[in-house]
Amino acid sequence: MVSVEPERSKLGIGQRLRMMWRMTSFRLTLIFLGVFLIFSLALVVVSIKTVNTVIQREARAIINEEMQMLRRVNRRGGLPLLVRAVENRSRAPGASLYLVVGPSNEVFAGNIKRLPTEVLQKSHWINIPFQYELLDIAQRRRPPPRRADDQRFDDDADTLINAPKKRRTAIARVVFLENGARLLVGRDFGQPQRFR
């Protein structure tokens, strides 16, 4: 008896796929491939979330240590010593984010040139992305005090600063000090070399 099966070379792509789908080994291979891809994707997502959690935990610990040290400096020597300490720390390569704001919103020291005003309104942790601009190293010499509610701290003040604004992800902590000043210490997640 002669088989009436069409030659494989004459079959179209659709017909070939239908023939392959009828084979159990092909269907099992696709199922295993799908399961493998799902578990691989889940592993990647869990790994990324775990690394992010570890980085945030380390950043919080570093910020808390720096905050405690700067609060001790403030208690020991008042605002002038705190300003000097923040100026020294903010000039270091790879420095954290620092800002000392007085009771009437004048900026005494720090390496942040622009910051949304609502960030400094209460004592809290800031875990959401916020726009800020770092001072250039040349600008970190002691500038005259400026007010935190000055336009330079307003998100919409594009006219005062020509550099393009970049949205950076930072974690920061704001604390109200005994003398009425506010202290911000933070870490930028956009620059991973700071976490070494």
Image (cartoon, rainbow, N blue to C red):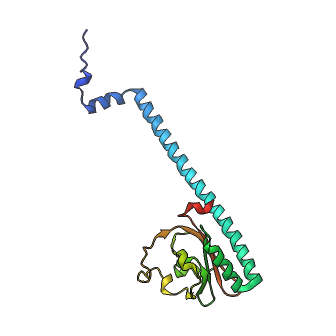
Res 176 seen here: no
Extreme residue in the left direction: 10
Pinpoint residue 160: horizontal percent, then vertical percent. Answer: 44, 83
Pinpoint residue 112: horizontal percent, then vertical percent. Answer: 55, 77
Location of the C terminus (image quadrant): bottom right
- Residue situated in front as seen by the camera: 27 or 117: 117
Query: In which image quadrant can residue 108 be found?
Result: bottom right
40 over 21 or under it: above or below:
below
54 over 131 or under it: above or below:
above
Pinpoint residue 22: horizontal percent, then vertical percent. Answer: 36, 28
Location of the N terminus (image quadrant): top left
Left or right placement of residue 31 versus residue 82 in this view? left
x 66%, y 82%: residue: 83
- Residue situated in front as seen by the camera: 191 or 183: 191
Pinpoint residue 21: horizontal percent, then vertical percent. Answer: 36, 30
Res 64 seen here: yes
x 32%, y 27%: residue: 19
Extreme residue in the top direction: 1
Q: How many numbered discs sit on the rendered protein?
A: 0
Extreme residue in the bottom direction: 104
Left or right placement of residue 111 versus residue 35 in this view? right
x 54%, y 77%: residue: 138
